[in-house]
Image (tube, coloured by chain):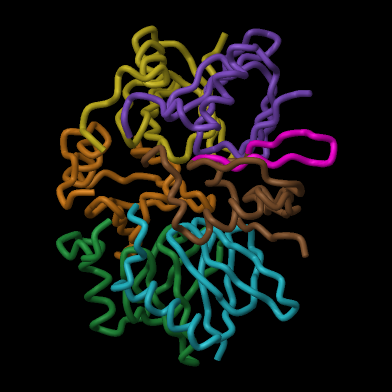
Chain colours: A yellow, B purple, C brown, D cyan, E orange, F green
Amino acid sequence: MSIELETGLPSVRQIQTLIREEREVELKLITNDLITGKMRWQDQHCICVVDHYDQQTVIWRSAIVYMKPKL
Amino acid sequence: MSIELETGLPSVRQIQTLIREEREVELKLITNDLITGKMRWQDQHCICVVDHYDQQTVIWRSAIVYMKPKL
Amino acid sequence: MSIELETGLPSVRQIQTLIREEREVELKLITNDLITGKMRWQDQHCICVVDHYDQQTVIWRSAIVYMKPKL
Amino acid sequence: MSIELETGLPSVRQIQTLIREEREVELKLITNDLITGKMRWQDQHCICVVDHYDQQTVIWRSAIVYMKPKL
Amino acid sequence: MSIELETGLPSVRQIQTLIREEREVELKLITNDLITGKMRWQDQHCICVVDHYDQQTVIWRSAIVYMKPKL
Amino acid sequence: MSIELETGLPSVRQIQTLIREEREVELKLITNDLITGKMRWQDQHCICVVDHYDQQTVIWRSAIVYMKPKL
């Protein structure tokens, strides 16, 4: 896997947009945990989410089931 | 993994057809969640499903168990 | 992953034979679901199974635990 | 993944030996199923186990947790 | 996968920083286990965490769901 | 994946050391099974553990959550 994110992919681009717009998202994980917050960065392995108390959670992509942008 | 989807594969083609025909599908996930809606796009990592309330769910392929087109 | 299925592999060949012979199979999935039907096609990502009511289920290979041809 | 099994690996070699010697094994799967029988063949994706009633089970490697040769 | 860690990636760099600063972290695993301690090293396959009793736990990356640095 | 183990990696080296020193380890698996014993060999796919009764368990790496050397 190269060090550059494939920014041409719709899923990568959508996450980049949600980061830039500081949109709140909901991430469902394979343990059934539901993480809510704003995404701060993504790389090939992880996505970082920050909650209202500024607590960072670095989530492994392999553990993500789905992402819902809040309406 | 290249940035181009392997559009020659039956599974990729069938999803493309279902997107174009705006067919409703059911997606079973490894958390046992069942997502129903119309698929809007796919890439190597994810498939995006939109429900009746226009809520987007971006689903990781690694979390999909099966897909059933609604009859 | 190349677009061609590795038809030299025993597992790929056995599935091809079961498709051609329209044998009924049982597929156990990681969610503990049990899918029964005839396989219609396979590619690198998925296997398609059709049941008695002609309902298609496109199953992700990553979600398959085992396959049993019906005796 | 090449079509040839890496027969130099201890795990591949041990399975080959168990197949040749028709030793009974126990396979624990991620669904907690326990499959008992004699292994008949292996390839990169699957291992085939046959039970006392000659029922074949083709098990996906990705679903195997451990294998115990019966003492 | 090359033997060198991709130190340009945000997730790899953040873990390196947390190791250097001896920050306490919480690691949630796919079995729902929660491991708390200081990370000591990382490589492509594993992350090593040491607890208050100096007990090492070598965690497989494939089993990590998320990591939270303690505030 | 090449047939040679990446012996430069800390995780691979630590397992080699534990094998050589015949240290007892605890392996937590994704099914929540806990395997205790001495590791005998490792390769890219599996790690072999032997218990007090000399029963071998060949564990798939993909099913390992963590390893704890006994203190």
Image quadrant in which the N terminus of chain B is located? top left
Q: Position of residue C29 (x, y in %)?
A: 65, 50
Q: Residue furthest right?
A: C53
Residue at 37% from the left image edge and 82% from the top image edge: F38
Stretch of the chain drawn in magenta: C45-58
- In this rendering, is residue C60 above or below F1? above
- Please state if E14 lies on the left or on the right of B27 as rendered: left
Q: Place residue C54 in its image quadrant.
A: top right
Whether residue C47 is in magenta: the answer is yes
Left or right of residue B21, residue E24 in this image: left
Residue drawn at x 51%, y 71% is D41
Please say whether residue F58 is one of the residues in the magenta stretch.
no
Viewer-closest of E12 and B14: B14
- F32 or D21, which lies in front? D21
Residue under the image location 57 percent in, 43 percent down: C42
Q: Position of residue D16 (x, y in %)?
A: 43, 78
Q: Quadrant of residue A18?
A: top left
In this image, F57 relative to E60: left or right? right
Query: Which residue extends farthest front?
Result: C20
Residue D24 at what x, y percent from top left?
59, 84
- Residue visible at 20% across and 61% down? F6
Question: Residue B55 at x, y = what percent?
Answer: 61, 12
Q: Is residue B30 visible?
A: no
Left or right of F71: which side holds E28? right
Which quarter of the figure is the C terminus of chain B placed in?
top right
Residue E43 visible here: yes
Q: Tell me the quarter of the picture where residue D6 sits.
A: bottom left
